[in-house]
Image (cartoon, rainbow, N blue to C red):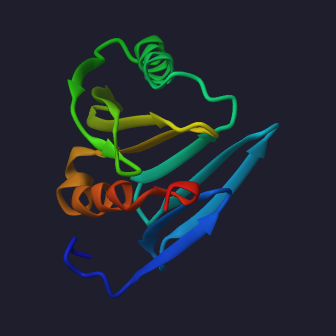
């Protein structure tokens, strides 16, 4: 699917957020206490996730925690600050790269906070898969909205 092919995008609208994703991808939800994790994935190892944190932690703290987890797991983790937008708000963003099973993996992390929740959106995949899928993963991230702010 190319990023211009919107015919197969379907809306997700629950838990105070909405976004669009390829309708033929699998969507799962996990609820832990008040926090929610929504993940969509196709038939590759790439995935896109949105974590809804109702405790409203600061976005920089959320990303720092994620980056530390990658650094603990992988010796060769490289982190780059990035600019971006999530839910139509300026976001704290980081790009992470690491090797796993001799494959270069890339991760994009974005976080914002509203008065009711903090969102953490991220996608992850190997470089060879991302050649075809990065545009759609970025498009999913760009489509995220907080319903209270619409």
89 relative to 66, above or below: below
Image spot of residue 107 (x, y percent): 33, 37
Picture layout, residue 24 above or below residue 45: below
Judged left or right of residue 29, residue 25 is: left
Q: Residue at x 33, y 88 (%)?
A: 7
Location of residue 69 with respect to 7 vertically, above or below: above
Question: From what the image shows, is residue 16 above or below residue 91?
Answer: below
The residue depicted at 44 percent of the width and 53 percent of the height is 47
Residue 52 is left or right of residue 93, and the answer is right
Left or right of 16: which side holds 19? left
Q: Give the quarter of the image for residue 115.
A: top right
**Residue in the foreground of this view, choosing between 90 and 3:** 90
Residue 133 at x, y percent in the picture: 26, 61
Q: Quadrant of the N terminus?
A: bottom left
Find residue 45 and report its horizontal and vertical position in percent. Answer: 42, 52
Q: Is residue 102 left or right of residue 146?
A: left
Q: Quadrant of residue 12?
A: bottom right
State the residue in front, 147 or 67. 147
Q: Quadrant of residue 122?
A: top left
* Depth check, front residue: 123 or 127: 123
Q: Residue at x 82, y 37 (%)?
A: 33
- The spot of residue 53 in percent (x, y) is 64, 36
Count of numbered badges drawn on the protein: 0
Furthest residue to the right?
33
Q: Residue furthest bottom?
A: 7
């Amino acid at each position: 699917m190319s990023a211009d092919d919107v015919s197969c995008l379907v809306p997700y609208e629950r838990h105070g957020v909405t976004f669009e994703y390829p309708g033929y991808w699998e969507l799962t939800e996990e609820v832990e206490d008040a926090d929610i994790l929504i993940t969509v994935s196709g038939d590759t190892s790439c995935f896109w996730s949105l974590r809804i944190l109702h405790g409203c932690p600061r976005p920089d703290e959320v990303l720092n925690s994620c980056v530390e987890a990658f650094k603990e797991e992988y010796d060769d983790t490289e982190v780059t600050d990035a600019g971006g937008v999530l839910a139509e708000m300026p976001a704290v963003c980081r790009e992470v790269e690491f090797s796993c099973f001799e494959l270069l993996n890339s991760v994009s992390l974005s976080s914002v906070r509203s008065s009711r929740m903090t969102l953490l959106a991220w996608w992850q995949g190997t470089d060879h898969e991302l050649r075809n899928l990065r545009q759609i993963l970025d498009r999913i991230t760009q489509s995220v909205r907080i319903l209270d702010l619409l």
